[in-house]
Amino acid sequence: MTTATSAAGRDERLRETTWLRRLFSRPELGSVAGFVLVLLFFAVVAGDSGMFSALGIINFLEVSAQLGIIAVAAAMLMIGGEFDLSVGSMIGFAGIVVALPAVEWGWPLWLCILLAFGVALLVGLVNGTIVMRTGLPSFIVTLGGLFILRGLTLGLTRLLTGRTQIPGLRDVMAGDPLAPLFAGKVGQGLMQWLADMGWIAARADGTPLAQGIPMSIVWWLVLTALATWVLLRTRLGNWIFACGGDPNAARNVGVPVARVKTGLFMFTAVAATIFALVQTLSVGSADVLRGQLKEFEAIIASVIGGCLLTGGYGSAIGATFGALIFGTVQMGIFYTGVNTDWFKVFLGVMMLVAVLFNNYVRRKATEAR
Amino acid sequence: MTTPLIEVRNVSKHFGSVIALEGVSMQVYAGEVHCLLGDNGAGKSTLIKTLSGVHKPTRGEILLDGRPVVFESPRDALDRGIATVYQDLALIPLMSITRNFFMGREHVVTKGRGLFRRLDVKKANAIAREEMARIGIDVRDPSQAVGTLSGGERQCVAIARAVYFGARVLILDEPTSALGVKQASVVLRYIAQARARELGVIFITHNVHHAWAVGDRFTVLNRGRTLGTFRKEEITREQLLEMMAGGRELEELSAELAEFARADAARAQREAAVEAEVAAELQQELEETRHFAEEERALHRQRRQSQVPE
C-alpha cells in the first residue's frame, strides 16, 4: 500500500516535470503568455469601456482575424526558411483584380474571385521560382515584388478608371454564390438567442448589437487549424520544418525543397487574397493602397508567435496569438482613449522582447541535456 | 568469388580543367568494412559523391550487384540501397529525433487516407526509440531536439536512420573526425554492428587508427589516383600512414627543407665574407689614419725644434 502510493507519487512528479518541459519547449508559449498579460492589462484599464462587450470582443477579434489570416501563412513560410514582403502589395493587387472586372466590365463576381485566386497562385509561383532558381534571398526578391505589385495596382487602376478607388462592390455582391464566403456573418441565430436571453447588448427592437461572427474570424480559425494540422501531423509539415532548418540536409534525404518552398509562397499569396476579399467585400470598395505595411505586421505577429527569423522553428498557433495580441492592443488603445500613435511604439518593443525571448528558447532547446 | 555489392571501375571525374579522380577502381562486398583513406584533396569526397549520385563520373562505370548503373540523383542512389551519411549528417538540430529519423521517408509511418493522411506520431516515436536502443543509446524522449544530443549520438541517429531504411551499402563520410575518443568508439562499435548485419560499409577517414580498428580492406587515394587496395593482413598501420601522407610528397618536402637550409647557409657565408671585407677595410683605414696622424705630429715636432733657436 505504502509502496504503491510512493510509486504513484514519484510517477506523478515525473510526469509533471516532463509536462512543464514540454510546455517550455513549445514555440507558442511566449505569445500565449503575452496575450494573457495584454488581456489582463486591458481588463483592468478598460474593463468598463465596452471593449469586453460582445460587440467589443468581436471588434478586436475581427482586427486580429484579418491579420491572423496572413500571419499564419507568413509563419509557415518563415518556418520554411523564407520571407514574403510582397504580401501587403498582394492584398491591394488582389482587391483590384476582383473589383476592376466586376464593377467596370460587369463580370460576375464569383468569376472575379476565382480569377483573383488564380492570379495569386501565379504571383506565388513566380516569387517562389525566382527565389529557388536564383538562390537570391527571398527578402530581396519579394521586396522587388512589393514595389512591382503596388505599382501595377496603382498604374492599372488609374489607367483603366482614372481613379485610385473602385467603389460599388455592394451592388454586384447581391445574389453572388461566393461573396457570402468572405463578407457574410455566421451564428446570427446564436447572437439573437444570446440577446433574447439578455446576456448581450441589444438594440431597442431586440436585434443584438453584434449581429454575428464575421467570416474573417471563421477563415482565421480554419486556416490556423489547417496550418497546425499540416505542420504537426503531416509529411508536408515535416518537410516544411526540414526546408527551413537546413535545406541542404533536407535535399540530401530526398525532400523536394524547391517544390515545398514554392508552394509556401503560393499559400501566402492566397492568404493575402483571402484577406483582400474579406476586406474589400465587407467595405464594398477596393483601394490601391490597401494592405500597406501588412507584410511587416504579419512577420511581427509570426515572430511574436515564436518563429525564428532563420527558419525551421515556429508554430501557426503562435502566429495566431501574435495576431491576437496585435488586435487586442490596437483596439484596447482605442477603447482606453490613449493616443493611437503609441501603438507603434508598443509593437516595436513587443517584437524586440519576443525576439530576445525566442533566442533564449532556441538556445535552451538545442542545449545538451 | 561473390559479386561485390558495389564496384567502381576505372572511374574518372573532371571538373573543368581539374582532375579530381583518375582511373579509380574499388569493390565493396557485403559484410565488410572498406576504409577509404587519403589526405585532404585526395579525392575521397568526389569518389563518395560519385557513388551516392551527387556527381556522374566523367569516365568509367559503377556496378551494383555486377550490373552497370547510373544514379540520376542522391534520391535514386538512396532508393537502390546506397545510403550516405555526410559529415554534416543531414540532421536538423532544431527538429526532434523522430522527425529527423523519418525525414524524407515519412510515408512509412502515416495512417489514414487521402486528405486525412497523417503521421502516426506514436508509432514513429516508438520506432525511433527502438532503433536507437538497438545501438545502445537510450533516448528518453524521442521528441527532444537533435541539437540536445552529443556528437556521437547524432552520428548514430544518422547511421541508424540509414540502416533502418534498408541501406545495403553504407557510406560514412568522416564519421569520427569531429568526435572525442569515447564518442568515436561508440560510432566505431556501430560500424562493426552494421558489418555484422551484412551491410557493405565504406568508411572514409584520415584517421588510420580508427580505420585500423574496424577496417577489413583499405583503399588509399592520393591526388585523385588510387595507390591500391590492401587487405588488413597484407599491410601494416605504418605503411598505410606513410602511403596516406604520400611518400613522394614527404620526400619533396624534405628536399625543399634541405634547400632552404642550404640557401640559409650560403647566405650566412656570403654575409660573413662581406663583413670580413668591411672589417678589413675599416682596419686599413684606421691604420692609415693613425699613420697619417703620426707623420703630422713628427712634422710639428721638427717645426718646433727648428723655431726654438730663433
Image (spheres, coloured by chain):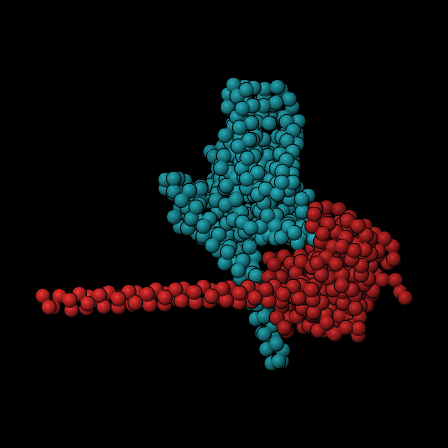
Image hue for chain A: cyan
Q: Is residue A156 visible?
A: yes
Q: Position of residue A27 (x, y in %)?
A: 55, 55
Res B197 seen here = no
Left/right placement of residue B290 relative to residue A310 reads: left
Residue A131 locus on image (x, y percent):
61, 40
In the picture, measured across the screen, residue A172 lies left or right of residue B170, that is: left
As displayed, is residue B212 above or below residue A29? below
Closer to the camera in the image, B232 or A329 = B232
Nearest the eye: B45 or A8: B45
Q: Residue at x 34, y 64 (%)?
A: B285
In the depicted view, which residue is nearer to us: A79 or A277?
A: A79
Q: Residue at x 51, y 46 (%)?
A: A301
Residue B215: x %, y % from top left: 75, 70
The part of the image, by quadrant, that contains residue B86 is: bottom right
Task: Write down the colour of chain B.
Answer: red
Point out the residue furthest to the front here.
B309
Q: Is residue A224 above or below residue B193?
A: above
Q: Find the residue positioned furthest to the left.
A: B310
**Where on the picture, by quarter, is residue B43?**
bottom right
Residue lying at 79% horizontally and 55% vertically, measured from the top left: B23
Residue drawn at point x = 24 percent, y = 65 percent: B296
Quadrant in which the C terminus of chain B appears: bottom left
Residue B12: % across, % down: 77, 53
Instruction: Note whether A364 is above or below A6 in the view shown.
Output: above
Corner quadrant of residue A94: top right
